[in-house]
Image (spheres, grey):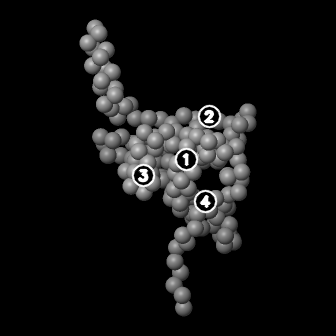
Amino acid sequence: MRKKTKSNKIWIDRDIYQSEAFCELVKRSKFGVPVLIWFFHSRQFGSKSGAKFGRQSDLPIINNGKIEFTYKTAKKRLGISKPTFSKILSDLVELGFIDQTTLGGGYARECNLFAISERWRNYGKPNFKNVKREKSEHSRMNSGLEQVKRKRENKKK
């Protein structure tokens, strides 16, 4: 008897790659689609009584809101720099593919957590809910560029 193994397939609805939001994502960055696919790969589907095999779109995502994708993972797996990855995350939130559920902090060693969103379905329509990604203030305040700007401002005073 053959042993059952976990599927290595990623489920992506046809509606997603035919949407205005997906087309906009492709225009914005060459790494946007691979990052989106990584988020889809990170989903874990729960079971629902009576669900037929192959109907993952009807199954609930049990780790929604707890999906993590760190800057370190983006660099290691996809070769994406921190600024580029930050921009892609912002794009994915703005286009409605993901929502940030927890704001992590570099000094506290907490990572950002995300949820798969359905807002992309209304992208480009009047009822689209526009959301911006939160960014950690303490990490921005201590970045090299911000420190240089503050030193210049202090010298002018």
Q: Residue 15 placed where, x, y %?
A: 71, 53
- 10 Å crowding of disc 4: few (<14), some (14-19), many (20+): some
- Specify whether 23 is left or right of 149: right
Mark 1 vs mark 2, foreground winner is: 1
In contact (CB < 8 Å): disc 1 and disc 2: no
37 left or right of 53 in image: left
| Nearest the eye: 41 or 117 | 41
Tag 4's secondary structure?
loop
Identify which residue is drawn at 70% across, 47% down: 19
CA–CA distance in space, label 1 to label 3? 12 Å
Q: Where is mark 2, residue-wise? A: 130
Under circle 2, the secondary element is loop
Q: What residue type is labelled 3?
A: Gly
Q: Earlier in the sequence, mark 3 or mark 2?
A: 3
Is residue 152 rendered to the left or right of residue 27?
left
Mark 3 to mark 4: distance in Å? 31 Å
Nearer the N terminus, badge 3 or badge 4? 4
Q: Mark 1 points at which residue?
A: 30
* Rendered image: mark on residue 8: none
Residue 2 percent across, percent down from the top left? 54, 87
Q: Where is residue 58 in the image (x, y as percent from the top left)?
A: 67, 61
**Pointer 3 residue:** 79
* Residue marked by disc 4: 60
* Contact (Cβ within 8 Å) of mark 3 with mark 4: no
Q: How far apart are marks 3 and 2 (CA)?
A: 29 Å
Whether residues under marks 1 and 4 lie with C-beta atoms below 8 angstroms apart, the answer is no
Sequence-wise, which precedes: disc 4 or disc 2?
A: 4
Quadrant location of the C terminus in the rendered image: top left
Instruction: From the image, state whether disc 1 or disc 4 is nearer to you.
Output: 1
